Image: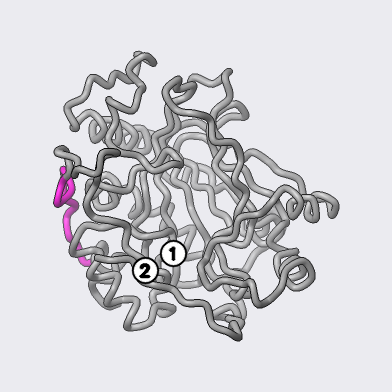
Amino acid sequence: MAPIAISVESSPRIMPAPTKTMMKSEAGDWRADLEKNGVAVIKGAIPRDRAIAYQQKAYDWLKSFGTDLHFDNPSTWIKQNLPVQSKINTFHSYGVAHEKFMWDARMEPGVLDAFAQIWGTDELLASFDSLNVTFPNRKDVPRKGSWEHIDQSPLRRGLHCVQGILNLSPSGPEDGGLVVYPGSHTLNDEFFDTQTEKSSWDPLDRYLFSKEQLGWFTQRGIQPRKICADVGDLIVWDSRTIHYGSEPTERSDQIRTVIYSAYTPAKLASDEQLALKRQVFEKYGGTTHWPHDNIIARATETYLEDGSRDPRDRDQPLELPEMTDKLLKLAGAMSY
């Protein structure tokens, strides 16, 4: 399915938050953290034993490509022994978004309940997002540094999307993981209204910040923070919060394993977007982290650097999930 072209209007239209109130929070509650800081950690959203089992399934998936990859041997953590990755250590090809272990993790009760609390409904759509397995201290790829960004267009005002990371491995201070600028979401409107020109605003839900622009936030007391979390924890953050995925330091030996998964109310999706979502689902494709909008399909075929199709490519997941009513509703393939 070809990507959808996005055109920039000559007079961009501001899109307010889809509902007036999306979450109710109390002091000390993780939802209060999300509202105040733009990020929160829900401890033990996935029972530890099941999270470890999902990580093992992710490892088995990587090993299924018939390589000489050995998780206990860092010398094998090289490009030749891995399926094709994106530039940010994620896997989104080969039907991985719809592997059984991916859907099983997405449908964990603690994960769904957290997003139901955020949005005030359990009638949710799930994103078809990626798997991230980051091997520390790889010698065959350059370090990418920081790439601070938000995943919401300046044209959207208020809370439109909350992203999620399902932690299947520990994420300590030295390990790879999410870095956020807590509270930056509260200054989002002021920044774009005073530091940028409206004519430059793009409906594409991604905005990369320059070092000079980040200085505007740090001068107002907004500083980066590495989010530490344990196996089975769920990290959630407002898409207006400045963030990036950090690489492990040289002191880390932890293989980062996470699943990106976001959820929004099904009622927010237009008929057109639902139709596109169903098309992607039927092809076992992946999309962005947006569940109800921005249904822009990732390429369903995987190509090598020489332009040839990867002979290891797949037209469907290695292990298909059980197509239950619950899954089909989360996928947008069945109505609530």
Question: Residue at 23% of width from left, 55% of height from top?
Answer: 300
Residue 220 falls in which quadrant of the image? bottom right
In the figure, 53 relative to 223: above or below?
A: above
Which residue is nearer to you in this view: 334 or 62? 62
Q: Position of residue 286 (x, y in %)?
A: 31, 57
Q: Amino acid at mark 2?
A: Ile
User: Residue at the spot x=46%, y=65% of the render?
Assistant: 116
Compared to residue 291, the image places residue 255 above or below, namely above
In the rendered image, residue 179, in percent from the top left (x then y), is placed at 62, 42
Nearest to viewer (mark 2 / mark 1): 2
Say few, some or many: other residues with alpha carbon within 10 Å of mark 2 (under 14 / 14 to 19 / 20 or more). many
Per the rendered image, the range of residues in magenta is: 314-325
Q: How many marks?
A: 2
Q: Amino acid at mark 1?
A: Trp
Q: Considering depth in this image, is 74 or 199 the residue closer to the camera?
A: 199
Q: Which residue is mark 1?
A: 290
Q: Quadrant of residue 332?
A: bottom left
- Mark 1 lies on a secondary structure that is loop
Q: Quadrant of the N terminus?
A: bottom left
Q: Contact (CB < 8 A) between labels 2 and 1?
A: yes
Please say whether residue 99 is one of the residues in the magenta stretch: no
Q: Position of residue 204 (x, y in %)?
A: 51, 68
- Residue for badge 2: 295
